[in-house]
Image (tube, rainbow, N blue to C red):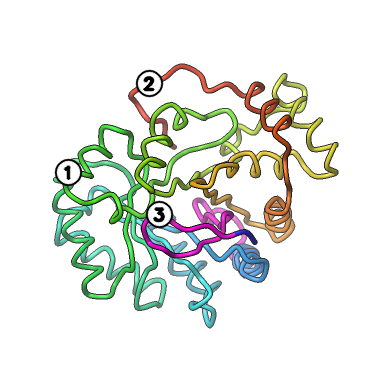
Amino acid sequence: MEQRVFGGTGKQVPVLGQGTWQMEEGDPDEAIRSLRAGLDLGLTHVDTAELYGHGRVEESIVSEAIAGRRQEVFLVSKVMPSNATYAGTLAACERSLKRLRTDTLDCYLLHWPGSHPLEETVRAFEKLVADGKIRSWGVSNFGVAELEELVELAEPERIACNQVLYHLEERAIEHAVLPWCEARGIAVVGYSPFGNGRFPRPDSPGGRVLEAVARAHDVTPRQVALQFLVRRPSLFAIPKAGRVAHLRDNAAAASLKLSRDELARLDAAFPLGAYSDELPML
């Protein structure tokens, strides 16, 4: 599995990881098997959050999947904006650590911009780093305006990543957010890379291009999509796979190499769309 430096952490992290949003809705035993199979295949970046299943995903799925293998895992969780006061962030992190049965997180994120002062959240993040509870911190669903506010409070190298919605039919981050983060060495992690039910139909114009590229490599369209979405050194993706077979399909995308011509065809087939100050999120 290809690895890249994850923002200012200096840590090498797999380009493809494993998301866990909505995993509580399926078979938990199969979800655990899928996460473990991912670890076996090098997808050791595991992303979760206190929001997911109201803590059940952390406690009943992720903690079980990483039991006995914590040292292999780059473990990420998130604090909800409603909890992101100074004291609230510290308490939320402690709860996540307890549910995950670990002493530390590799990265801790603010799930999306909220109403509490960002300064309090950043101060709590730095306290957690100092106390050894987390190794790094970042944000999720931050547009350029929120990122600009953030760098008034912390140097860019303190911000490990910005986790954002990114799939073939939702490329809004490429207008401004992605270049902004790249210029400052901040990793960009794409969540829901298959569109959360909006994957291109085979008979759509973009879908036909996707199918043609997939046939040329004898791979699946989803593998082509994943490789396109991590085509730049700053990009990472965290697809969810609730089943082992789906997980293996995702993992195989890491070895796929797309030509410049194929990347250009996909780029043209899935245009960026109009720029908006509002960053899309699920």
- For the C terminus, give its image quadrant: top left
Q: Amino acid at mark 2?
A: Ser
Q: Amino acid at mark 3?
A: Gly
Query: Residue 259 in the image: x percent, y percent?
Result: 73, 37
Q: Residue at x 38, y 21 (%)?
A: 276
Asked if labels 1 and 2 touch by Cβ distance under 8 angstroms, the answer is no
Towards the viewer: 93 or 178: 178
- For the N terminus, give its image quadrant: bottom right
Query: Residue 45 in the image: x percent, y percent?
Result: 52, 62
Left or right placement of residue 229 versus residue 148 in this view:
right
Magenta residue check for 22:
yes
Disc 2 crowd, CA 10 A, few/some/many (<14, 14-19, 20+): few
| Label whose residue precedes the other's in the sequence (3 or 2) | 3
Residue at mark 3 to residue at mark 2: CA–CA distance:
25 Å
At mark 3, the secondary structure is: helix
Query: Residue 107 in the image: x percent, y percent?
Result: 37, 62
Mark 2, residue position? 276
Mark 1, residue position? 152
| Label whose residue precedes the other's in the sequence (2 or 1) | 1
Mark 3, residue position? 7
Towards the viewer: 90 or 118: 118
Q: Does 64 appear above or below 200?
A: below
Segment tinted magenta in the rendering: 3-28
- Label placed on residue 15: none
Residue at mark 2 to residue at mark 1: CA–CA distance:
23 Å
Q: Does 70 appear above or below 10?
A: below
Left or right placement of residue 119 versus residue 236 in this view:
left
Quarter location, residue 48: bottom left
Q: Amino acid at mark 1?
A: Glu
Query: Residue 40 in the image: x percent, y percent?
Result: 66, 71
